[in-house]
Image (cartoon, helix red, strand yellow):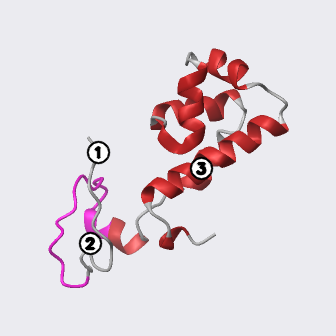
Amino acid sequence: MNFEAMTDKSIAAEIGRRIEQIRLEQNLTQQQVADEVGLSRVSYRKLAAGAGKFENVIAVLRVLSRLDLVEQFVPETTFSPMEQLKLKGKQRQRATGGHAGNADINTNKQKTTLDW
């Protein structure tokens, strides 16, 4: 699946669809999952449609015993050994954003409006 070509909303809907598939494979009703998480069935249905809070998505993955998917979703990264030497054991707290070698994060991306 080419997530680069998809809108944020369609990616969220795809994640919801995949969560629904896991629920169905485990033969659980929407109400059962919603009860375990502490949501209403309507809120669960919104989550499955891609409109759920991230915290609730994690809670549903926990109920479905699939928290391993979070590690795959955003894997932990580490700095290169050279970067760690430059930092001299300190943990990086912020990005400067002004290095010549870094491309602008908004380059070639479509502008989206926030709904909050």
First to last magenta residue range: 85-101
The amino acid beneath tag 3 is: Ile
Q: CA distance from mark 1 to mark 3?
A: 19 Å
Query: Where 79 sits versus 36, above or below?
Result: below
What residue is shown at x 59% (from left), y 49% (from top)? 15
Q: Which residue is mark 1?
A: 115
What residue is shown at x 63% (from left), y 21% (from top)? 34
Q: Earlier in the sequence, mark 1 or mark 2?
A: 2
Query: Where 82 sits versus 12, above or below?
Result: below
CB contact under 8 Å: marks 3 and 2: no
Query: Where 87 sits versus 40, above or below?
Result: below
Residue 15's label in the rendered image is: 3
What residue is shown at x 26% (from left), y 79% (from top)? 102
* Secondary structure that dominates the magenta span: loop
Q: Earlier in the sequence, mark 3 or mark 2?
A: 3
Q: Which residue is mark 2?
A: 106
Q: Is residue 14 left or right of residue 20?
A: left
Residue 43 on image: x %, y %: 53, 25
As for residue 30 lying within the magenta part, the answer is: no
CB contact under 8 Å: marks 1 and 3: no
The amino acid beneath tag 2 is: Asn
Query: Where 36 sits versus 10, above or below?
Result: above
What residue is shown at x 68% (from left), y 27% (from top)? 63
Q: Earlier in the sequence, mark 1 or mark 3?
A: 3
Which element carries disc 1, helix, strand or loop?
loop
